[in-house]
Image: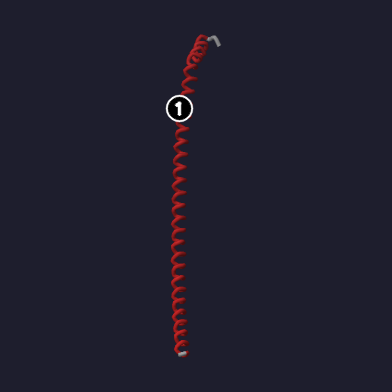
Amino acid sequence: MAEEMIQLIAAAEAEAAQIKTAALEKAAAIVFDAETRAARKEQSAAEVCKAYRETQIKNAIEDAEKEYNASLTAGAQSAKTYCEEVLSGADSVIGKIVGRIISGDC
C-alpha cells in the first residue's frame, strides 16, 4: 500500500511537471505573440504618424503658396492702382512742362 501511494505521488508529480512545462511553453508563446503584435502596432502607428506629418507639411506648403500668391496679386493690384493715380495727376503737369519747353519759357 505504501508502495502504491509512493507511485501515485510520483505519477502526480510527473503529471504536474508536464502540466507546468506545457503552461510555461504556452506562456512563452503568448508573450511572444503579444510582443510581435505590439511591435506591429508600434510600426503601424509610426507609419500613420509619418504619413500624417507629410500630409500636414504638404497642406501647410499649399496654404502658404496660396497666401503668397494672394498677397502678390493684391500687391500688384495696389501698385497698379497707385501708378494709375500718380500718372493721371502727372498728365496736367507734363502738359505744362512740355508747353513751357515749346514756348521757350524755361
Q: Which one is nearer the viewer's eye here, 15 or 73?
A: 15
Q: Position of residue 51 (x, y in %)?
A: 44, 51
Which residue lies at the image location 44% right of the left edge and 89% below the top edge? 4
Residue extending furthest front?
1
| The one of 61 and 75 positioned closer to us in this rendering | 61
User: By what rule are the colours in the image chosen?
Assistant: secondary structure
Q: Amino acid at mark 1?
A: Gln
Indicate the quadrant where residue 26 lies.
bottom left
Give residue 101's position: percent from left, percent from top.
Answer: 52, 12
Residue at the image point whose x is 46% and y is 76% from the top: 20
In percent of width and height, residue 41 lies at: 44, 59
**For the residue labelled by badge 1, is the local secondary structure a helix, a strand or a loop?**
helix
* Residue situated furthest right in the rendering: 106
* Residue under numbered circle 1: 77
The front one of 1 and 42 is 1
Which quarter of the figure is the N terminus placed in?
bottom left
Relative to 57, say whether 32 is above or below: below
Quarter of the image where one finds residue 25: bottom left
Q: Nearer the viewer, residue 100 or 78?
A: 78
Q: Is residue 67 above or below residue 24?
A: above
Name the residue at 45% across, 64% down: 34
Q: Residue at x 46, y 52 (%)?
A: 49
Query: In this rendering, is residue 49 above or below 100?
Result: below
**Considering the image in quadrants, where does the C terminus appear?**
top right
Look at the picture and state if 100 lies above or below 60.
above
Q: Residues within 10 Å of mark 1 (few under 14, many from 20)?
A: few
